[in-house]
Image (cartoon, rainbow, N blue to C red):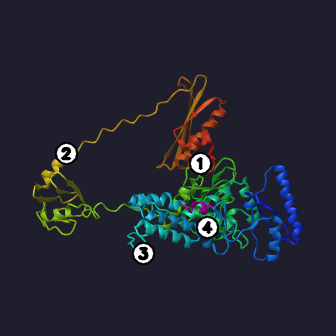
Amino acid sequence: MGCSHDELCENSVVLYHGEWSIHEDCHNVLKILGEYESWSGQKINKEKTAIFFSKSTTNEAKSSIKNLFQVQEVKSYEKYLGLPSFVGRGKKASFNYIKERVWRKLQGWEGKLLSQAGREVLIKAVIQAIPTYAMGCFKLPLGLCDDIEAMIKKFWWGQRGNRRKIHWIWWSELTKSKMVGGMGFRDLAHFNDTLLAKQAWRLLHNKETLFYKAFKAKFFPNTSLLEAKETSSGSYAWKSILYGRDVILDGACWRVGNGKSIKIWQHHWLPRKHPTKILSPMVETMEEATVDCLINEEARTWNVAMIDGIFAPQEAEEIKNIPLAREVTEDSLYWPWEHDGRYSCKTGYRFLKEDEVGFQVIENQDHEDGLWKKNNAVIDARKKLKTFCTRCGVVNSWTGYGVLIACGISGTNSALQVSVNYWHRYLIIIGNQGCLPLISGPYGTNETSFDEFQALKMAPPPSRPVRRPRWKPPDRGSLKINFDGAIFAEENCSGLGVVIRDGKGLVLASMTERILQQLRPEEIEALAASRALEFARDLDITDAVLEGDSLMVMSALKFENFGLAPFGLLL
């Protein structure tokens, strides 16, 4: 067993199989470790040191090596720094300790009388946080995620032991945001992919780290991460990162620089809501064409005639409105769900949940759906009420929990607004349009009661006047440069303006420019800031204060943390 190379990581030494003698190689390793101790002054703790053997290692070799190193042997599924040391074929068994921890937490709280709100807090703050650390490094088996969610569901619906409880709502509904009627519980499989996508994002953009250099040399030496493929020799950590890479490929968008790395029909590069791929029919001769063929390199503008001839009108306009930097830059991948273009686990999870339902906009239910069922008083009140139309005189019988007024003059009116008169303890029903039903009850009709109800309504507080910020002069001896951008949707263009004033507020110089593109607000603001700085440079102004009304652009100029944002090329 020879030492082909050593990997020193978190004080662990990994030995690989070789061809030379066991004793000679082991003594060489001990010699190296001894020199390390003498130079560093740190002593190796053999009680915390362990060794792992592959299945092909003979028992005689194992005994000999353990006697020379005086260390213990690591068995399968043992943990190091809270994670499995080795993940083999039995992946579920490797991470089964997570399920056991969740079970112990739930068992400890089973005997206590927690309210529904208390269960929600326990699930979100404790239970679903347990597997987060392991999820950031490995792809947990889907069966394990299902088992954990099964325990969470039973705990949420109040199941005790073998006593079963009815699960009134699908778990997929509970994992939706509270804004759309869910409970905000995490979908563990999606959350796992979200955390792994963070590691993939680091490999894409932090190329100076040791993490990138080690994985680049080991798993994708001749290609990029986006083009890397899974191999049988790759570690499980690498295979897990590829799951996160797929999330980046689905949700990220390309920012057009020189256009040479972006394939027109294969990549996501349109700055719009999902989907960001080109949907226009593909031209047979341009199957592998890149975006640079759509750009006039000398003028750094779009080839309008070519774009109008290839793409559908709507997509052609979207392409022509993409701003191009004056200088040629490399294409870059950014995360369109964040303002600064950087990936975050929060928006990554939101993207996966929206992608699961096909990015459908969930509309609020009609106000009248289930309206009567939500009011407890209506069960008794409906027996004492009868309705008739004040216009046509048609009497309507009260059936069920709703009322449908059929008017011969105004037609059928099903849009009813309900106001509850708690002072007289009966309901007033006012028609929004068409026929106005007249409801008689034990205390009179709704016409007089509605007037009383309106009189009791408090007038809304007067709105405060909006305080607009006033322009403040700069310090003496300095100048202030104000810039702003505007969008003219009717003319399909944008505009910008720059004003330079002195300490007394006198205008020293100004400029305006018309942009033949309908840019987005942050893009036109960024372009206006860039033009303002260029204008000041042309006037040899070196000491000035730059001021604009876009917090996003001013933060980008101040902190330089918007390099991946779509408007970053314009600054």
Mark 2 or 3, nearer chain start:
3
Q: Quadrant of residue 395?
A: bottom left
> Of marks 1 and 2, which one's residue comes earlier in the chain?
2
Q: Nearer the viewer, mark 1 or mark 3?
A: 3
Q: Residue at x 42, y 64 (%)?
A: 111
Circles 1 and 4 in contact, beta carbons < 8 Å: no
* CA–CA distance in space, label 1 to label 3: 58 Å
From the viewer's perspective, is 290 left or right of 168? right
Q: Which mark is residue 52?
A: none
Residue type at mark 4: give it. Answer: Lys
- Which amino acid is tagged 3? Asn
Depth-wise, is mark 2 or mark 3 nearer the camera? 3
Label 3 residue SS: loop
Q: Decide: marks 1, 2 in contact (CB < 8 A)? A: no
Q: Helix or strand or loop: what does disc 1 sit on?
A: helix
Residue 134 on the magenta segment: yes
Residue 387 location (% of width, % of height)? 14, 63
The local secondary structure at tag 2 comes to helix
Instruction: Tell me the distance, in whole angstroms, between the alpha carbons under discs 1 and 2.
Output: 53 Å
Instruction: Please give the residue where the numbered disc 3 appears in the rendered image.
Output: 162
Q: Mark 1 = which residue? A: 567
* Dot 3 or dot 4, earlier in sequence: 4
The residue stretch that appears in magenta: 130-136
User: Cα distance, mark 3 to mark 4?
Assistant: 31 Å
Q: Nearer the viewer, residue 291 or 240?
A: 240
Residue that mark 4 sits on? 139
Residue for point 61% across, 30% down = 544
In reply to whether residue 275 is colored magenta, the answer given is no
Work out whether residue 549 can be spotted.
Answer: yes
